[in-house]
């Protein structure tokens, strides 16, 4: 039996950027952001992101991924690399809540060689631009640190101006108009909820 099946989370082969791909982690982050929260946004990058919005914890996602790979006998590095190579460099697995996850080879190191992120068009996942996600996080972080004395809610008239102020603080270009049905509106509302 492979001993990595029950490894502590700090010693497992999974690389998962929860701040970029896990809404519950983002909620926790904005509830008490570190003083230099802007630096944390760098890991989000500049592309489209698949964001998991379900209820599974990071540890549950990692443990279920490890269990799935153990059952397939591809948990060690050489078997994992061969398994990926036979499928154009990535694979999709399903977790117990119905969500799908993309697995790739992490190039970060040979210890955390399994890079996972939510699969595109998966249950419990939304696709969002990185700049939109950064803006929503920054909105709440600035609100936490009271840099914005009176932040209008998304229904208020000055919401577009507020978002442009927020975007300026994280060096993003301004937007023309914040729409009520937009992802930024949804993210700001749902990051605050719960």
Image: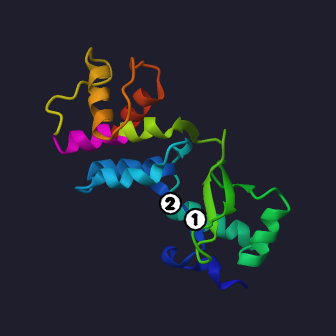
Classify 10 Å Cα crowding around label 1: few (below 14), some (14-19), many (20 and above): some
- Could you say whether the residue bearing mark 2 is in a helix, strand or loop? helix
Give the extent of the magenta segment.
Answer: 137-146
**Residue 193 visible in the picture:** no
Q: Is residue 11 left or right of residue 67?
A: left
C-alpha gap between disc 1 and disc 2: 6 Å
In this view of the protein, which residue sits in the foreground, 28 or 167? 167
Image coordinates for residue 173, horizontal then vertical, percent: 38, 30
In the picture as drawn, the residue positioned furthest to the right comes out as: 86
Q: Within the image, what quadrant is residue 34 found in?
A: bottom left
Classify 10 Å Cα crowding around label 2: few (below 14), some (14-19), many (20 and above): some
In the picture as drawn, the residue positioned furthest to the top comes out as: 157
Disc 2 target residue:
58
Image coordinates for residue 189, horizontal then vertical, percent: 37, 32
Q: CB of mark 1 within 8 Å of CB of mark 2?
A: yes
Q: Is residue 84 left or right of residue 163?
A: right
């Amino acid at each position: 039996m492979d001993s990595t099946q029950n490894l502590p989370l700090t010693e497992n082969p999974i690389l998962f950027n929860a701040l970029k791909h896990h809404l519950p982690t983002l909620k926790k982050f904005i509830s008490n952001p570190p003083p230099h929260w802007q630096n944390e946004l760098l890991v989000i990058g500049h592309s489209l992101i698949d964001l998991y919005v379900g209820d599974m914890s990071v540890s549950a996602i990692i443990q279920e991924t490890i269990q799935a790979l153990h059952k397939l006998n591809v948990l060690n590095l050489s078997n994992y690399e061969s398994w990926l190579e036979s499928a154009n460099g990535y694979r999709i697995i399903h977790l117990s809540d119905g969500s799908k996850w993309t697995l790739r080879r992490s190039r970060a190191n040979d210890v955390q060689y399994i890079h996972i992120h939510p699969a595109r068009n998966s249950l419990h996942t939304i696709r969002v631009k990185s700049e939109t996600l950064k803006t929503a996080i920054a909105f709440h972080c600035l609100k936490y640190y009271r840099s914005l004395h009176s932040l209008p809610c998304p229904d208020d008239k000055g919401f577009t101006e507020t978002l442009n102020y927020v975007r300026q603080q994280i060096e993003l270009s301004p937007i023309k108009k914040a729409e009520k049905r937009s992802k930024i509106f949804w993210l700001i509302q749902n990051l605050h909820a719960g």
